[in-house]
Image (tube, rainbow, N blue to C red):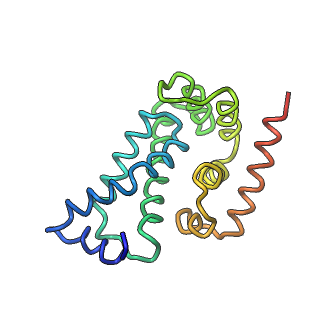
Amino acid sequence: MDNEQDFIQLLSASSTKEAAFRELLKLYKERLYWHIRHIVKTHNDADDVLQNTFIKIYKNIHNFKGDSKLYSWMYRIATNESLTHIKKNAKHLNLSNEETHRQLVNNIKADVYFEGDDIQYKLQQAIVTLPEKQQLVFNMKYFQDIKYKEMSEILDTSEGALKASYHIAVKKIEAYLTQD
């Protein structure tokens, strides 16, 4: 994708939309999957949310204003879809967000696609103890190495606030992992 503006025009034009969207899927499917997976925790939920994310992108590409990079806009949609998914599950099960996050982590070990060891499982347990924003920031920085500038476009928060959130999240995770 050399020129993002040209690519967006291909996505917006009815004659080229399908082919351009297939290319978009090829470019971003895996990255968005892992972004979503770190939020919703299980493969099946991540697959569902990823599908909803790409449907939303496809239907709303004409609303993309170009104020940020295309991938930042897509990550924002993926993040919002992930959080909406968690909130819907919480409401359906009559649980608080925190209880839902804990239940998601408990489901990780049962997920046949989870390949982590006990340390990775314990890290996931630590992450869910964080407030939602700190979870997002930690996951994006630690697992995906997203730069603060890009993260600020995705989460619509200042870089300074994101750095502070990440620092606090790391300290809380360290404390959680060293307790016992």
Q: Residue at x 84, y 35 (%)?
A: 178
Quadrant for the C terminus in the image: top right
Q: Residue at x 71, y 37 (%)?
A: 126
x then y, percent, for residue 155: 56, 62
Asked if residue 147 is positioned above or below residue 128 in the image, the reply reads below
Along the line of sight, the residue nearer the viewer: 49 or 149: 149
Q: Is residue 139 left or right of residue 46?
A: right
- Single out the residue that lies furthest toward the top: 110
- Single out the residue that lies furthest toward the front: 2
x then y, percent, for residue 51: 34, 45
Along the line of sight, the residue nearer the viewer: 157 or 147: 147
Q: Residue at x 21, y 64 (%)?
A: 17
Along the line of sight, the residue nearer the viewer: 90 or 22: 22
Image quarter of residue 25: bottom left
- Single out the residue that lies furthest toward the left: 15
Q: Is residue 84 left or right of residue 61?
A: right
Asked if residue 91 is positioned above or below residue 84 in the image, the reply reads above
Quadrant for the N terminus in the image: bottom left
x then y, percent, for residue 36: 48, 46
